Image: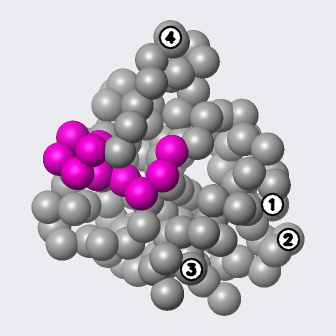
Amino acid sequence: MPRILIIDDDPDVVEFTSIVLEKEGYEVVSASSAADGKRAIREEKPDLIILDVMMEQPDDGFVLAQEARADGIRTPILMLTSVGKAFGMEFGKDDEMVPVDDFAEKPLEPAVLLAKVKKLLEKEG
């Protein structure tokens, strides 16, 4: 079963997302900071990364995605954000500034999460 890495500093988001994914049979690992996430990407070799935009710094998720792509990591990335609802901002995929495969607004419905995960894993496979 595919391994999914969740990088988010909110323990509630990590727990909820993990429960939903594990119930579907996915193997889930997590990191609670950008630094731990970067290390986990190398060590865990996930099939999919679920990445929060804002952690210690407001742009941690963007920076981590950029660094991963610069390091040659091609693992699909699903970026989670609550920025749109909180501040009325919208983000889109951008190969240079926001090099991710898909976006999702938090809070995320389980069915939406699972559909996005399945789609990204199929694309990868």
The one nearer the camera, 93 or 15, is 93
Instruction: Characterize the local packing of mark 2: few (<14), some (14-19) or many (20 or more) Cα atoms within 10 angstroms.
Output: few
Is 46 situated above or below 104? below
Mark 3 or mark 1, which is nearer the start of the sequence? 1
With 18 as the anchor, is 86 left or right in this view?
A: left
Q: Nearer the viewer, mark 4 or mark 2?
A: 4
What's the residue at 81%, 55% (across, down)?
111
Residue type, numbered disc 4: Phe
Residue type, numbered disc 2: Lys
Q: Which residue is mark 2?
A: 23
- In whole angstroms, how far apart are the C-alphas of marks 1 and 3? 18 Å
Residue type, numbered disc 1: Val
- Dots 2 and 1: beta carbons under 8 Å? yes
Q: Which residue is mark 1?
A: 20
- Dots 4 and 2: beta carbons under 8 Å? no
Instruction: Characterize the local packing of mark 3: few (<14), some (14-19) or many (20 or more) Cα atoms within 10 angstroms.
Output: few
Q: Residue 87 — which label?
A: 4
Q: Which residues are magenta?
A: 94-103
Is 11 situated above or below 84? below
Q: Secondary structure at mark 4?
A: helix
Mark 4 or mark 3, which is nearer the start of the sequence? 4
Q: Secondary structure at mark 1?
A: helix
What's the residue at 21%, 40% (across, down)?
97
What's the residue at 32%, 60% (across, down)?
38
Mark 3 or mark 2, which is nearer the start of the sequence? 2
